[in-house]
Image: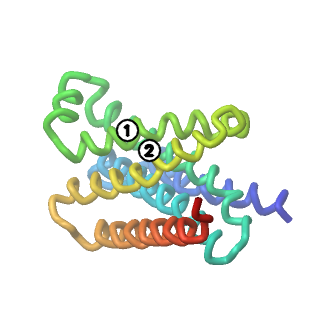
């Protein structure tokens, strides 16, 4: 079952990329194609970040390890869509003109926080393989706790981009808060269960 289900999940994760590729090639992006591609890739970046963060709470709730088998895949897809999102901004929006890009990073907080989130995703992506897990040992878990900070940065990026909290960013914020609460409660339970020295 695992041999069938995992490739199916992988293909499902590619659907947003297939959809936007189809829309690009067949000119179905509307009057503002760059804005549409940016919005599409940004939305799916945030969704995959939250989906990957949801795997551990689901594992704890259901007491099943099946969820964590897909956490790495979802995290890598989050980086994939985040890179497409960044490439759209750098390549299509600014035509690789670095001066205004640097100016945006320094002066626009939503660009700064979004870029910071992408930078934090790089070490997690590099160390996502089993070989790095063995090398880093306990440090691997500490490093990958950055995923929660990335989630916070990504939601802030969307909220600040929206100027005010509209319905869609608010939904993402609520989901992130719920996931963080689950994480904090789980840590408290583990601390209570640990033996006192």
Residue 82: give its label. Answer: 2
Whether residues under marks 1 and 2 lie with C-beta atoms below 8 angstroms apart, the answer is: yes
Disc 1 is placed on an element classified as helix
For residue 28, say whether it is visible. no
Q: Which residue is mark 1?
A: 86
- Assign the C terminus to one quadrant of the image: bottom right
Marker count (numbered): 2
Q: Dot 1 surroundings within 10 Å: few (below 14), some, or many (20 or more)?
A: some
Does 164 appear above or below 33?
Answer: below
Q: Which mark is residue 156?
A: none
Q: Residue at the location (58% across, 57% down)?
A: 15
Position of 140 with respect to 180 (left or right) is right
Lateral position of residue 40 relative to residue 3, left or right: left
Q: Quadrant of residue 167?
A: bottom left
Residue at 63%, 35% (x, y): give it.
136
Q: Secondary structure at mark 2?
A: helix
Residue placed most toward the observer, 41 or 18: 41
- Is residue 10 found left or right of 123 in the rendered image? right
From the top left corner, tell me how far across and down residue 102 is, in percent.
22, 27
Question: Marks 1/2: CA distance?
Answer: 6 Å
Q: Is residue 166 visible?
A: yes
| Above-or-below relation of 16 to 60 | above
Q: Residue at x 50, y 43 (%)?
A: 79
Q: How is the image coloured?
A: rainbow
Quarter that holds the N terminus: bottom right
User: Which residue does the image show at 27% across and 50% down from the upper left?
Assistant: 32
């Amino acid at each position: 079952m695992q041999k069938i289900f995992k490739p199916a999940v992988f293909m499902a994760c590619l659907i947003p990329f297939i959809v936007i590729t189809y829309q690009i090639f067949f000119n179905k992006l509307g009057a503002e194609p760059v804005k549409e591609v940016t919005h599409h890739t940004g939305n799916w970046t945030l969704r995959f970040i939250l989906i990957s963060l949801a795997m551990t709470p689901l594992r704890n709730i259901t007491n099943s390890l099946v969820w964590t088998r897909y956490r790495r895949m979802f995290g890598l897809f989050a980086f994939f869509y985040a890179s497409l999102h960044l490439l759209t901004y750098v390549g299509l929006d600014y035509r690789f003109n670095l001066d205004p890009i640097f100016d945006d990073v320094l002066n626009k907080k939503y660009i700064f926080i979004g870029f910071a989130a992408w930078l934090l995703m790089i070490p997690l992506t590099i160390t996502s393989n089993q070989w790095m897990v063995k090398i880093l040992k306990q440090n691997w878990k500490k490093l990958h706790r950055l995923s929660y900070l990335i989630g916070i940065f990504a939601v802030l990026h969307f909220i600040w981009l929206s100027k005010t909290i509209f319905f869609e960013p608010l939904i993402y914020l609520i989901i992130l808060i719920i996931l963080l609460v689950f994480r904090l409660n789980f840590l408290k339970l583990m601390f209570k269960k640990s033996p006192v020295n």
